[in-house]
Image (spheres, rainbow, N blue to C red):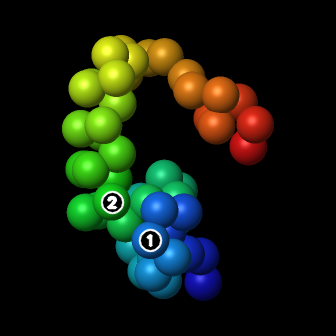
Amino acid sequence: MSTCIRCGRKLKDKRSIERKFGPKCFKKWQKEQKEVGLEENQMTIEDVAQ
């Protein structure tokens, strides 16, 4: 089983496993990205490094 890259909890849902974030952490991450000013189609350096 995979774990969330933000909080380390086990991921059970297929979509969460694909995103590597649980649903709550994903929402927090999305909010942070909007605050930083990244658009949905832009990648961060972390995305590229994976």
Question: Where is residue 3 drawn, in percent x and y?
Answer: 55, 75
Snapshot quadrant of residue 39: top left
The reply to whether the C-beta atoms of the residues labelled 2 and 1 are less than 8 Å apart is yes
Secondary structure under tag 1 reads loop
Direction from residue 6 to residue 50 in the image, left or right: right
Snapshot quadrant of residue 23: bottom left
Distance from Cα at disc 2 to Cα at disc 1: 7 Å
Question: Where is residue 6 drawn, in percent x and y?
Answer: 47, 62
Q: Which mark is residue 7?
A: 1
Amino acid type of the residue that numbered disc 2 sits on in the rendered structure: Cys
Q: Give the labeled residue for mark 2.
A: 25
Question: Where is residue 20 drawn, in percent x and y?
Answer: 52, 59
Q: Residue at x 44, y 71 (%)?
A: 7
Q: Which mark is residue 41?
A: none
Amino acid type of the residue that numbered disc 1 sits on in the rendered structure: Cys
Direction from residue 30 to residue 45 in the image, left or right: right
From where the camera sits, is residue 14 visible? no
Secondary structure under tag 2 reads helix
From where the camera sits, is residue 32 visible? yes
Snapshot quadrant of residue 15: bottom left
Identify the image quadrant of the C terminus. Answer: top right
Identify the image quadrant of the N terminus. Answer: bottom right
